[in-house]
Structures are given as structure tokens and as C-alpha cells.
Image: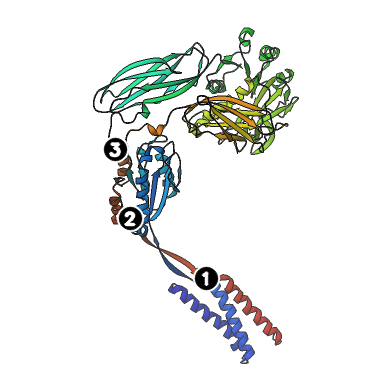
Amino acid sequence: METITVLYIVLAAIGALGIVVLQYVYKKKAKSKVYLLLAFLRFIGIFGLLVLLINPQFSQKSYSLEKPNLVILADNSSSISESGDEIKELISELKSSEEISRRFKISDYLFGSELGVLDSLTFKDKNTNIYKSLFALKNIFAREQTITLLLSDGNQTIGQDYGYFKSNENSTLYTVVLGDTTKYKDLSVGPILTNKYAFLKNKFPLETYISYQGNTAVSTTVTVKMNDRIVHRENLNLNSETNFKAISIEIDASTVGIKNLIVEISQLPEERNVANNRRSTSIEVIDEKTKIGLIADILHPDLGTLKKAIESNEQREVFILKPNVANSILDEMDLFIFYQPTANFKSAFDYAKSKNGNTFIITGPHADYSFLKEANLGFEIENGYPQQEVFALLNNAFSKYDISKFDLAEFPPLISDAGPIIFQKPYEAMLGSQIKGLNVQQPLLSVIEDNSKKQALLVGENLWKWRMQTFRNTGDFINFDEFMGNLIRYLTSTKNKSRLNVDYEKVYEGSTNAIITATYFDEAFLFDPNAKIKIRVTDKKTKSSQDNPMVLKNSYFEADLSNLLAGEYDFLVSVDNDTRTETGLFIISEFDMENQFVSSNNSKMKKLATNSGGKQFYVSQIEAIKKELIENDNYVPTEKSTINIVPLVEFKILLALIVFAFAAEWIVRKYNGLI
């Protein structure tokens, strides 16, 4: 407690005593025991009030010992399974060392594609993302002194280049290199670039590259096969300087169906890793495109956005047309998109109606709502409203197909001058409307289905901003393009309304992302989360089958088929107590990124450690690692002091004492008739 505070307390006691003496001794001249008791109570009350005003405090200092963090980060990918026993032994040695335990607070994590708490190492992860794991730990231990011990072969298969990772100032990173660091001769096939779809009687491109690691010249042969038929063969001569050869060819799409493409290079006599000498992918050959007429009378960025998004699926082709286009051209279209239609669109509208064609109508400030009303489209839009910003709300109860994966995060508003919409036909809202933070209970995007005819209605312009925001959010356009593609697929589909719908890819590169999803609706076409859906997958080559239940995930069911080997599979999705089924065919290509490396990347691991002030070790140097951690004076527990300022007397206790003193004085005076 400070000296000035003590002085204030003494002065408060003197002041309170002076007031009591003045009131009960000097003026009253009374010396009875009652007056002495009253004087004492008055002194306690006044002195308590003065102490309450002074609020005396004193400090308490406590000490604690803070250890630096030792974070053990172990690679759990399949590429280092051969070093598994050495990793486990190293971790066990570090965690059981008493000197290290006294010096550090030990935490252990594992990683593959994601960071996780180290429970048990299985070495089954199909991908390695070193950068993501280091970045996550950087955030977790941002304000604490941390030493990270990275146990890995340094071969990263996905994510940002960890060679550019920058640690915090209070963090140091040590690397422990696993696996074989010897540089062997090795040939490898790079990623195969081709289209998802090709069109019958056309050529489709295929691009890849062959890389060579070694010091002497070698000769090899690369072959490209489509369904076991050689479509290209090329002899290569490579050496330490010319160690890269690009392969770029065109292949004829002569028959319809899924085609398995294999790029293979002959192995060297002394080559150890031959898993990376072969790479495969698949392409589906189709016999026609879906032609879509985008009819507009104005120039707007939305037109290019719609064309790009729809044509991201090469099965579709968009033609931007004027409203007065000839009927012979309209006759080739499978779907009509009318962008901000006016009376000039009458002939195109009449033709689409006569053809009973499906339509997608997009309105905005340039649209003529009176014309739309006269066109008798099954809805009416009130006009005369000002332009305003309309934000989209995802309708999770939409039942036509699964839209739960569409992410509207940070999407800007569309511009609309549409008033309330009156529907004369059954409709379902896909996106709702929010204006100035209020859900106005009006659809922004809706679909109308009347017998075999389908319509979509969007009341707002500036879709191009949504596509740009998708790129800002994710670095690509997939979120928006898939949403728009699914809508176009629904509008161009001629299938009857189905209560069981299945979504899957025709080709999966490796089994890691082999996922099939399904949605099931009850008789009222509401999503049924209680349905029991099963999937039977059959290997077309071996004829062996496996049955698995599909797991409920939000508003859809999912089957994870990552346990399947590479091959061609048929599947059958069925529902308990229902005769409905869905069938399909998919291919899992034979590819494992973790098997593409012949040796450890010790040079990059050393660079990572050096950049953060640490060192590189090898897994056999257990004693050297322990010595560095124990003897380095930079990593010692730190004693920290904490000063707590606390009041001399608790506020509530002091207040209660004051109230008691004055109340007791009043009662005594009242009892003795002194008031």
C-alpha cells in the first residue's frame, strides 16, 4: 500500500474522531455509557464512509513458471509408411525424456491433408499438406514461445508451397527428414490434362509431360492408350540437362461412352519407383451438345457471365441471339433464356410457346412487365416499383434437386425493380429475397413446372457480380458455375419428376474423392431425412459387390467409396420400403500421388528449418535432437510475475458495516428517547 494512502486513512480516522468529539463530548458534555456507545457507532459510520471514498488498495504479486511449447508434428501419409517404426520410436523417446518434460510443454499432432491431434499413426492418408498444418499451428501458438519438430519426407502433394512458409518471431522450426534421401534414376509421368467430355467424331486434346531425375543419358518409350488400344507412341532421349519432355496430342473420339486413358513410360533397368511411370484418367464421349439460346436486346455483362458459366460444362453451347432471330435458328435450341424481355421479344416468345420449349426468364430494370403479363406465362409481376438492392437467401427446403452446396457468403445484391409476384401455376422458390435486412417473403429465383414444361424466373440483374464474388471467395468459379449448370440441367432434362435423385462423377482420379450423393423425397415431395438408402457397388471386372448404407448429411445422403481400388464399377441405389432405384457407372483411375516420389526432399526441409532459425536432422539422430532441445539456452522456462491489485476492505463488507453502525446508533438513540 502506498504511503499517501496510509496518510489518507490516518487523516480519515482523525477527522471521524474529531466529528464524534464535537458532537458527543464537546456539545453534550455527557459521559454516560450510552453516549460513549453512540459516539463509537458514529465514529465507525463516519470513518467507514471516508474509507469508502479513499478506497485503499494494495498489490499482491504471484509467480508462475511458463515452459516453452514443444510441438511434435508427424506426417501420417502413406509415402512414409516404411519409416513408421522409426517415427514412433522418436516420438516415444522425446515424450518419455524427463529432462525434455521439465523443460517443455509437449503437444503432438499428425497431418495428412488436414491437421489432427496425434492419437495413433496409421500412415494411410492419401495426401500431404505441410503448409496448411504449419499455418494452423502458427495460429494456435501465435503468442507463445514454440519449437515445432516437423517429422516428414518433405514431399507435399497438395496445398501451397511450404518452402515459402514464414513462422512467428517467437517460433523456431526443426525438421526431421524421413525416408530415403538417396537420389536414384527415375522417370515419371506428370498430370494428364484433357476435357471431361468429348463429342463423337471430333478430336479431343491430351497434354502431359515426362520428367527424368538422373545424371546419365537414357532412352525410353512413352505410349498413350485409350481402352487398351495404343493411340500414340513416342521415343524419348533424356539426360541431366534435357530432363523434361512435353507430350501434346489429339485423339479421335470414334465411339460413345467412357474412355479410359493411360499414359505409360517404359521403366529403366535400375529404376526403383515404377509407380509414377503410369498415369490414367478418363473422358466421356457424347454424341450431341445441348444448345441454348440466350436472347437479349441489350448489352450487359450478365450475358457473358451466363455463357461462361453454362459452357463450363462442354456438353452445352450457348448462342447469344437477337429477339428478331429467324425461327430456323430457334428451332435448333433446346432451351430459351430471355434476358430482360420487352415487346420486341413477342415473336421469340410465341415460337418457344408453340414448341412447348422450356424457358428461363431474367428480368431487371430494362424488362417490360406489362408484356410479360400479356404473354400469359403463369405469373404476373407488379410494376411501378423503384430500383432497389435485393440480397439472395438460399431455400434449403428446395426439393427439385440438391442446392445445399451453393455458398452465398458475401454475395453482393442484385438490382431489381420488380414488385410482388403472383403465380397462377405451381412454383417453388430456389432463392428468397432480402431487402434492407428484411426477408420480404418473395422469390428471387423460382421454378415453375406445369406437366412436361419447365420455367425458371429470376427477378434481378448483375449476375456477373456473383460469379466474381465466387472467384474472390474460392479462387475459382466452380461454386457459381455448378449452381447455374445444375439449373440448366434441370431445365433441359426431359425426365419425369423423380423422388429419388443421385449425383455422382463419371470419373474419379484416385479413390480419395469417390463420393456419391442422393436425395429422396416423400409423396408430398418434401425431403425425407428418415429414409434408409443403400448403395450396392459392383466391380465390372471381378463381379464382386459390396453393400453400404448411405449416411445422412444435412439435406442429402452420402456414400464414401474411398475404400475402393482403381477400376470400373456399376452401382445401384435403393430405398427401403420403396421400389424406386437409380443405377449408374463410374471409373476410379489408378493413381496415388503419395507413390509418385522416389526419395525424400531433404533440401527443401533444410531450407524450411534454416529460414525459421532451426536445424535439420535425420530420423536416426535421436540423441542429437534431444541434446539440441535440452542444451539450447534459448529454450528455458520463464518465470513470470503477476501483480493483482485488490481493495483493503471488500466494498460490500464495508458498506454493510456503515449501514449497521448508523442503524444501530439510530435504534439506541430511539430506545433511550434521545431523538
Q: Residue at x 26, y 24 (%)?
A: 239
- For disc 1, the marked residue is 55
Identify the image quadrant of the N terminus.
bottom left
Sequence-wise, which precedes: disc 2 or disc 3? 3
Amino acid type for the residue under numbered disc 1 = Asn
Determine which residue is flagged by label 2: 635
Is residue 675 something that shows in the picture? no
Disc 1, SS = loop
Q: Nearer the viewer, mark 2 or mark 3?
A: 3
Alpha carbon of mark 3 to alpha carbon of mark 1: how far? Answer: 70 Å
Image coordinates of residue 486 in percent, x first then y, are 59, 25
Foreground: disc 3 or disc 1: 3
On the image, which quarter does residue 598 sit in?
top left
Q: Which labelled disc corresponds to residue 181? A: 3
Count the numbered circles shown. 3
Disc nearer the start of the sequence (3/1) = 1
Tell me residue 466's x, y (percent). 55, 29
- Residue at image location 65% in from the left, 82% down from the top: 665
Tell me the SS state at disc 2.
loop
| Amino acid type at image mark 2 | Tyr
Q: How crowded is mark 2: few (under 14 residues within 10 Å), some or many (20 or more)?
A: many
Q: Is residue 325 above or below residue 2?
A: above
